[in-house]
């Protein structure tokens, strides 16, 4: 029992530690920050290896899907080392190793987390995840109250919480938490007014934070997913396929989006409803069009990718970078996880991720339809799939990517997994996957 408690405690603090690592990476040292963020995942992995070494054997069945996840994280690690080898500015060997730990370790750590919780209730992971994200939010509020601000992505006039990867990461995490609260609200409504009051209060608090962070795309996706939930469209498989074409849909429907946002009910919430700004999605449309042009016309490195921040080697964002980030033009990116993945990790990397996304979508949709407690994750998965196209929240070592690997790990570790303390020794099959 105490072993499981240790693993669960490390999981609980993993996302707050990840957030603190983000702050250190931006303000002090990238290498030190990456190491701090990876400590809980490293400790989970080391604990498991020591447990196996000292005789505790595990029965675990992993199918081909495990190797899809492993191949995907390794493609991310490969992209980092490739860019270091090619000479990407400000990328040292130590920072590559540190960032690679954040890309590689969480996936195995999440598998181990489920391995130590084989008989936990279906709603155990979502509950612990929500607690961890709540702890992350509390740490951010304490840091902000102490005068700290985000060092990696700061914009004047916005709520710049210090221990998130950036403004959009903060807004997306809060949006995910609100979608989990919506799931809980659907269960109680008027049957439990005390709980309902608590859920509504927490939802409103997060909504206020999102408002002051003022990420319009995050708010749009959150509102769209909530509408899908209450209109019944959330169950449709079209959500997966539509999410893959979000960029072309937005580019072709930008005027319609502007007309919707100018409605009084949305204009007061979005705050910044300017025609040029909205129809270009704060300039993102120019980046997306360049990315799409590379996919269909240029295609250099499209199979295995051009390495981390591969657009630097392609040079296709150089002119825009000179206008927006003249001091650090090599830091310009596509503001799209899917474009980042295909440019940096190639069709191979994107294909692996899409397989993961589809399996995760299919699994949690089934759990939701069966009204299982872990069906709560389905709302979050739909949000992540739509957000995949319009921000880097789901790319590489960003929090959204970690969430996807956490959800995938549940599929990998089947409920048949158990320790030798719970099954006869002759039924135990040892498979060391770490």
Image (cartoon, rainbow, N blue to C red):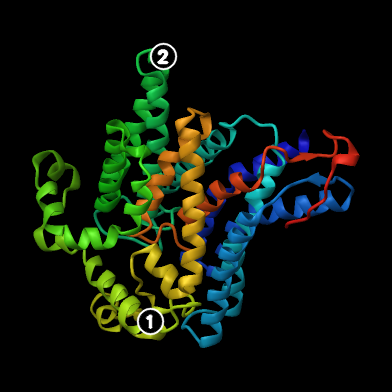
Residue 203 is situated, as x and y percent measured from the top left of the image, at: 35, 32
Residue positioned most to the top? 191
Q: Indicate left or right for 276 with 113 as reference.
A: left
Q: Nearer the viewer, mark 1 or mark 2?
A: 1
- Residue 158 in view: no
Residue ID for mark 1: 299
Q: Residue 192: which numbered mark, if any?
A: 2
Query: Which part of the image, by quadrant, shows the N terminus?
Result: top right
First in sequence: mark 1 vs mark 2: 2
Label 2 crowd bin: few (<14), some (14–19), many (20+), radius 10 Å: few
Name which residue lies at 32% across and 77% down.
Answer: 296
Residue 295 is situated, as x and y percent measured from the top left of the image, at: 34, 76
Q: Indicate left or right for 263 with 375 as reference.
A: left
Q: Indicate left or right for 268 with 36 as reference.
A: left
The answer to which of 27 and 326 lies nearer the viewer is 326
- Residue 60 in view: yes
Residue 399 is situated, as x and y percent measured from the top left of the image, at: 48, 54
Label 1 crowd bin: few (<14), some (14–19), many (20+), radius 10 Å: some
Q: Residue 110: which numbered mark, if any?
A: none
The answer to which of 92 and 111 lies nearer the viewer is 111
Q: Callout 1: helix, strand or loop? A: loop
């Amino acid at each position: 029992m105490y072993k499981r408690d240790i693993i669960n405690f490390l999981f609980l603090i993993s996302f707050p530690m990840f957030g603190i690592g983000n702050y250190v990476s931006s303000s002090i040292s990238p290498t030190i920050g990456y190491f701090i963020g990876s400590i809980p995942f490293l400790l989970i992995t080391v604990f498991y290896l020591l447990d196996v070494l000292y005789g505790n054997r595990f029965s675990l069945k992993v199918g081909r899907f495990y190797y899809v996840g492993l191949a995907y994280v390794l493609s991310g690690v490969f992209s980092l080392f490739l860019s270091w080898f090619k000479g990407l500015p400000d990328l040292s060997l130590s920072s590559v190793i540190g960032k690679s730990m954040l890309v590689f370790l969480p996936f195995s750590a999440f598998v181990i987390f489920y391995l130590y919780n084989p008989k936990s209730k279906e709603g155990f992971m979502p509950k612990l995840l929500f607690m961890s994200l709540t702890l992350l939010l509390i740490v951010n509020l304490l840091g902000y109250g102490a005068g700290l601000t985000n060092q990696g992505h700061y914009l004047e006039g916005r709520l710049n919480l210090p221990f998130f990867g950036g403004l959009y990461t903060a807004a997306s995490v809060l949006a995910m938490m609100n979608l989990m609260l919506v799931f809980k609200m659907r269960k109680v409504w008027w049957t439990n007014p005390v709980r309902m009051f608590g859920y509504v209060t927490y939802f409103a608090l997060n909504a206020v934070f999102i408002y002051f962070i003022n990420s319009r795309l995050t708010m749009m996706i959150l509102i769209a997913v909530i509408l899908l939930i209450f209109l019944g469209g959330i169950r449709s498989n079209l959500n997966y396929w539509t999410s893959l074409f979000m960029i072309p849909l937005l580019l072709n429907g930008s005027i319609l989006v502007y007309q919707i946002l100018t409605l009084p009910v949305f204009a007061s919430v979005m705050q910044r409803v300017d025609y040029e700004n909205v129809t270009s999605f704060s300039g993102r449309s120019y980046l997306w069009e360049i990315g799409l042009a590379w996919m269909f016309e240029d295609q250099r490195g499209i199979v295995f990718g051009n390495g981390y921040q591969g657009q630097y080697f392609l040079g296709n964002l150089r002119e825009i970078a000179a206008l927006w980030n003249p001091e650090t033009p090599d830091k310009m990116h596509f503001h799209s996880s899917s474009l980042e993945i295909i440019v940096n990790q190639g069709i191979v990397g994107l294909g692996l991720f899409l397989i993961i996304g589809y399996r995760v979508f299919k699994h949690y949709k089934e759990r939701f339809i069966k009204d299982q407690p872990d069906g709560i994750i389905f709302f979050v998965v739909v949000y992540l799939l739509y957000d995949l196209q319009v921000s880097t929240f789901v790319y590489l070592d960003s929090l959204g990517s970690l969430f996807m690997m956490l959800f995938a790990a549940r599929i990998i570790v089947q409920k048949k997994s158990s320790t030798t303390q719970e099954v006869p020794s002759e039924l135990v099959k040892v498979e060391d996957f770490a």
